């Protein structure tokens, strides 16, 4: 699927900035990442805890529902599977919600995703990136610093939660922020699943 342009998309070399609400101002003293929901015991991580987890470097294509696609961006971050290793997930869990800051609420934004497609190197909570025009650099606050989820290329980028704060494990699918406003639950760009 690498460098494959979905229908209705155009390629850009830039990484456009689009977001809803205020830009989160990172405070390491108060920042926490929570793993909760259908788990035996929830876990809470500090930013230092997150940075001590094994890291992954991977190129992930991005496809935004606003019709731009960007190829060849390399990200460094924590793979989703590393976070799943920190909790005992109950039987029957099929989906997650990735939460993020929205206008001061640590859990004000969310995006729903099935767990199964997120076990590879292309589902990352990122903090650094590079491409052909840029050397390694931290993601900016407007791109989701200190931690942003980047989903596999099989999902539109609104599933890529900025200012990520947690994961909730669910036994059934449940609409997130944009899904409640009429966007697709499944969000496959190659099937043009933009809206319900």
Image (tube, rainbow, N blue to C red):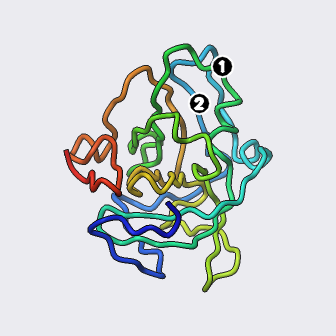
Residue 50 is left or right of residue 40, and the answer is right
Write down the quadrant of residue 105 in the picture.
Answer: top left
Q: Which residue is mark 1?
A: 88
Q: Which mark is residue 20?
A: none
Where residue 177 sits: x, y (%)?
Answer: 32, 44
Where residue 33 sits: x, y (%)?
Answer: 60, 39
Q: From the viewer's perspective, is residue 191 above or below residue 167?
A: below
Q: From the viewer's perspective, is residue 158 above or below residue 114?
A: below
Mark count: 2
Q: Residues within 10 Å of mark 2 (few under 14, many from 20)?
A: many
Residue 92 is left or right of residue 29, and the answer is left
Question: In front: mark 2 or mark 1?
Answer: 1
Where residue 128 sits: x, y (%)?
Answer: 66, 65
Depth check: give the residue in front, 163 or 70: 70
Where residue 73 sits: x, y (%)?
Answer: 58, 71
Q: Secondary structure at mark 2?
A: strand
For image coordinates 62% across by 64% down, the residue present is 59
Q: Which residue is mark 2?
A: 35
Q: Secondary structure at mark 1?
A: loop
For image coordinates 62% across by 14% down, the residue present is 40
For image coordinates 56% across by 62% down, the residue present is 60
Quarter of the picture containing the C terminus is top left
Write down the quadrant of residue 136 in the picture.
Answer: bottom right
Residue 24 is left or right of residue 31, and the answer is left
Q: Residues within 10 Å of mark 1 (few under 14, many from 20)?
A: few
For image coordinates 45% across by 35% down, the residue present is 114
């Amino acid at each position: 699927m690498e460098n494959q342009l979905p229908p209705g998309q155009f390629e850009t070399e830039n990484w456009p900035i689009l977001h809803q609400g205020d830009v989160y101002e990172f405070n390491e003293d108060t920042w926490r990442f929570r793993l909760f929901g259908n788990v035996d015991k929830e876990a809470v991580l500090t930013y230092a805890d997150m940075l001590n987890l094994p890291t992954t470097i991977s190129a992930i294509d991005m496809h935004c529902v606003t019709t731009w696609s960007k190829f060849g961006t390399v990200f460094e971050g924590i793979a989703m599977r590393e976070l799943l290793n920190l909790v005992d997930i109950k039987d029957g869990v099929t989906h997650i919600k990735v939460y993020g800051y929205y206008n001061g609420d640590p859990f004000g934004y969310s995006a729903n995703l099935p767990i199964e497609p997120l076990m590879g190197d292309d589902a990352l909570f990122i903090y650094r990136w590079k491409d052909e025009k840029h050397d390694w650099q931290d993601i900016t606050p407007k791109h989701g610093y200190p931690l942003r989820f980047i989903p596999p290329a099989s999902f539109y980028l609104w599933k890529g939660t900025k200012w990520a704060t947690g994961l909730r494990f669910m036994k059934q699918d449940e609409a997130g922020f944009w899904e409640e406003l009429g966007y697709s639950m499944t969000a496959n760009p190659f099937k043009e699943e933009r809206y319900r």
